[in-house]
Image (cartoon, helix red, strand yellow):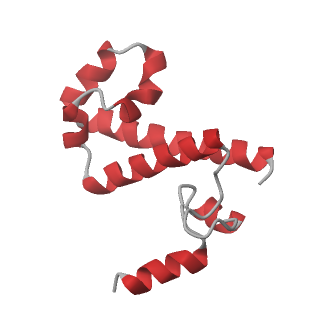
Amino acid sequence: MDKVMIDKMKELLQSQKREILDTLVASNADFRAIVEEMDPKDFADVASDDIDRKMLEALGSQDLKRLRAIDAALSRIQLGKYGLCMKCGKKIPTERLTAIPYAVLCIDCQKGEERRNR
């Protein structure tokens, strides 16, 4: 995957992460107080640092799963493994990553997982 695409996906992932955190701040007074006391440069790292249990309790389970998946995708970008299927190692199609930027499986492996989980 070329650098331009990786940079685009990184920006998209960071935007989705900010969106989840902004929603949380807007809807939860306890979390808002925690964020207001933080240094602004730490805000982007608040989820990955798990600095306070209240944040995790305030997040819905779907948002928490998505936030963890986003953090994992950002880590894969840093490690140079973004866009590769975690199961078979093949490249994940750009179309799939555009739709689900934190996808970890190629379409074939995802279909296999879904069949096993039925």
Taking 117 as reference, is 21 above or below it? Answer: above
Quarter of the image where one finds residue 113: bottom left
Seen at 35% across and 15% down, the residue is 38
Give whichever of 16, 90 is nearer the camera: 90
Seen at 65% across and 60% down, the residue is 84
Seen at 46% across and 41% down, the residue is 17
Taking 71 as reference, is 41 above or below it? Answer: above
Give whichever of 78, 18 is nearer the camera: 78
Number of labels in the image equals 0
* Residue 99 screen position, x and y as percent: 59, 63
Seen at 37% across and 35% down, the residue is 47
Q: Quadrant of the N terminus?
A: bottom right
* Residue 97 screen position, x and y as percent: 63, 61
Quarter of the image where one finds residue 109: bottom right
25 vs 53, left or right, is: right
Taking 51 as reference, is 41 above or below it? Answer: above
Q: Quadrant of the C terminus?
A: bottom left
54 vs 20, left or right, is: left
